[in-house]
Amino acid sequence: MKVSRCKGTRDLMPQDMARFRKIEAEIRNCCLGWGYREVRTPVLEYLHLFTSAGTLSPDMLGRVYSFLDWDGWSGERVVLRPDGTIPIARLYVENFQDTPITRLFYVENMFAFEGTGEESRERWQCGAELIGGSKPEGDVELISLALEALGTMGIDRTEIRLAHAGLLKTFFEGLGFSGEEEAAFLDQVFSGNLDVLGDLRERSPEAEKQLQLLFNLKGSTPGFVENIKSVFSSSVSGLEPSLKELARIARMLTGLGFDYQIDFASGRNFEYYTGIIFGFYTGERRLGGGGRYDELIPLVGGKDMRASGFALYLDELMNLIEEPAERERILVRVKNEEGLKDCLEAARLLRDAGYIVEFDLGVEEAVGFRWVVDMRCSEGTEIIDQVSGEKSLSASPDELLKWIGETECR
């Protein structure tokens, strides 16, 4: 009986893995260059890490993979991690709390159930977290790091979309929304369903009017934030700190020459964010996002600590970048076992020089190989350049390497 892979999963083929490793290498190189250190959290985490903190929306909690981890007659409910930042917050509290500023990054897979099986239940992310510090410059640092990483992959036309969780929360607190009501409402808005704003009409016609205006406003200058102040500050109290922070970040992004759009309907994955929220887009394709989550560290048992982070989505990026060029391949035809040592030595030298070397085990054809090295000849080692058709004989592995290098340069 043929056994298929699980619904909602995918096999990564060699060409997929080549793209995956290229993305991973570029992000790792950029993060290390900015002073971030790599960590990896367990695939299994206790469920109460996500429930006691109240950080995941009811929708997300309803889609986690959870089960009992038995220990004798009792067990603790565990989950396959549905999120990357919350486990990093736990790791930070356990290991780095006395460090004024901690810069960490990760490359990990996340899991969430999807009923149809047509969308992915496993997704890969590269994320960076900046914990500590007290200035909005930290958010701009993360945005700059993400754009640099995308640029090294050849993705240059990236738009930043900005929202602010603090501003939105202030609106809903004024309406008397509970945390769950607010989360459910914003989940609909950020999923693109602005019709849900009509549900506010009976509760507060004025609030519905203001939110309709807010979620439909878009701008790309610091002056746009000043316009928001003039429209809303007199009617909604408590917005000043959020608008001031948003304006400052907008000014810094403008000064750096980054393309951005302030769009309050773009704040996806908002659950634990308290401040600026940013997303990275090429066209309408979302490549990643992040934001400030100042309340998360205390929620998982740590001290009050400012923190920001972002994640880039490998599954999306793999569809955008080209497969890396493969190294030149060489096929070695092996003589009898007495000559195996010489064959292995020649292959080692060629691999050290950067070539892919495969042995002919009796079934390989020479298709796809730049050179064929036949060590079965009594006169010496025969080398064939399959591009030019040139042939040569070499008496030693060093001569073999030299000839291949010369023909490659022609």
Image (tube, rainbow, N blue to C red):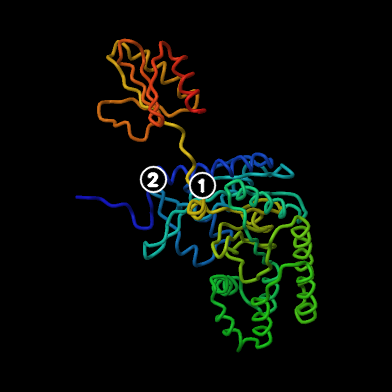
Identify the disc placed on residue 13: 2
Q: Is residue 71 above or below residue 241?
A: above
| Closest to the observer, 326 or 253 | 326
On screen, residue 24 versus residue 230, left or right, reads: left
| Closest to the observer, 297 or 187 | 187
Query: Of the residues shown, which amino acid type is indicated by label 2?
Result: Met
Mark 1 to mark 2 CA distance (whole Å): 18 Å
Where residue 361 sits in the image (x, y, percent)? Answer: 28, 25
Query: Of the residues shown, which amino acid type is indicated by label 1?
Result: Glu
Where residue 385 sits in the image (x, y, percent)? Answer: 40, 27
Please name the residue shown 64% across and 43% down the image.
31
Q: Is residue 384 above or below residue 33?
A: above
Secondary structure under badge 1? strand
Where residue 62 sits in the image (x, y, percent)? Answer: 46, 64
On screen, residue 389 versus residue 301, left or right, reads: left
Question: Label 1, on which residue?
Answer: 108
| Closest to the observer, 121 or 250 | 250
Where residue 177 sits in the image (x, y, percent)? Answer: 63, 76
| Closest to the observer, 32 or 350 | 350
